[in-house]
Image (cartoon, coloured by chain):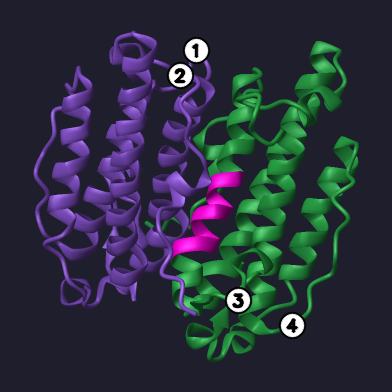
Chain colours: A purple, B green
Amino acid sequence: MLFEMTVPQYIKMLKNLSAILDKGAAYAASKKFDTEVLLQARLAPDQFPFVRQIQIACDTAKLGTSRLTGKEAPSNDDKEKTWDEIKNRVQTTIAYLEKFSAADFKGAEDKKISQPRWEGKWLNGNEYVHEHALPNFYFHITTAYAILRKNGVDVGKKDYLGPLPYKN
Amino acid sequence: MLFEMTVPQYIKMLKNLSAILDKGAAYAASKKFDTEVLLQARLAPDQFPFVRQIQIACDTAKLGTSRLTGKEAPSNDDKEKTWDEIKNRVQTTIAYLEKFSAADFKGAEDKKISQPRWEGKWLNGNEYVHEHALPNFYFHITTAYAILRKNGVDVGKKDYLGPLPYKN
């Protein structure tokens, strides 16, 4: 089921990311530097900065879900300039995702999924989730995490994965 | 189906990683430095180096598949010291994964999955794939990619995602 493979995990990872953002803000406060420094930080000069990694992670989840279900997604202007604004971007994406249920994904596996830059070419829903949406989503979440990690924020794998539903 | 969510994508991403390793070796040769420098590179002093990121990515795919299917996995001693050795680690992991088919994953969704550090606690197969194996796999692939990216290797998103099965 494409729903259970995507939406619950998008929501969970974005909640983890929100907690990681809080750690970033606390670190900036403790070191007395402005969080805008972190928003513009990057691993390589020709790579997107932190703020753009978050925007793309959110859009991968939002647009991926919108395309698979045929339901419209709210548009974002990508103009976040502050930590509060980027945290709000994550929160509003979570709120959007929380409206979906498995029923919305009926037939999504075989849907023709495209996006503007593919110039009319398409993947089916399964291919889109496995080979594009999930790898991209985790790529941008991990890159955002890595930028904070490199800058000294005390985050670890548990912050990235979040709580696991262990049973005894 | 847990098979189609995992094995084909593990194989594809490890093949992409193998091509990324080739780009790293070519870059080291062009700049006349030893690839061992890259093997020990990391983003933060208390983070695993590149070589360990590759080992863990391979083990996440190998052990994840072994646990879900109940089939034994070859052991690795994690003693890779050269670029050829780490590339071989990726290749042997791909060869192991290529032996599996959907039939091996019958009932995997409800299997109790554990690992030594969980001290007897477990996740079911679905939870294990969605919340642990896939996020971890992409985490270590992306971190390896990020280490090379930060060190100047000319890799981009297409190298990470690999070819997509677009249709017209």
Pointers 2 and 4 in contact (CB under 8 A)? no
Number of residues whose C-alpha sits closer than 10 Å to that of mark 4, classed few (under 14), some (14–19) or many (20 or more): few
Mark 2 belongs to which amino acid?
Arg
CA gap between label 2 and label 1 equals 7 Å
Stretch in magenta? B131-140
Residue at 43% x, 63% y is: A164
CA gap between label 2 and label 4 equals 42 Å
CA gap between label 2 and label 3 equals 40 Å
Q: Please tell me whether residue A56 belongs to the stretch shown in magenta.
A: no
Indicate whether B105 appears above or below A160: below
Q: Please give the residue where the numbered disc 1 appears in the rendered image.
A: A45
Pointers 2 and 1 in contact (CB under 8 A)? yes
Indicate whether B118 appears above or below A50: below
CA gap between label 1 and label 4 equals 45 Å
Q: In terms of secondary structure, what is the magenta stretch mainly?
A: helix
Q: Please give the residue where the numbered disc 3 appears in the rendered image.
A: B120
Look at the numbered disc 2 and give the secondary structure of its residue: loop
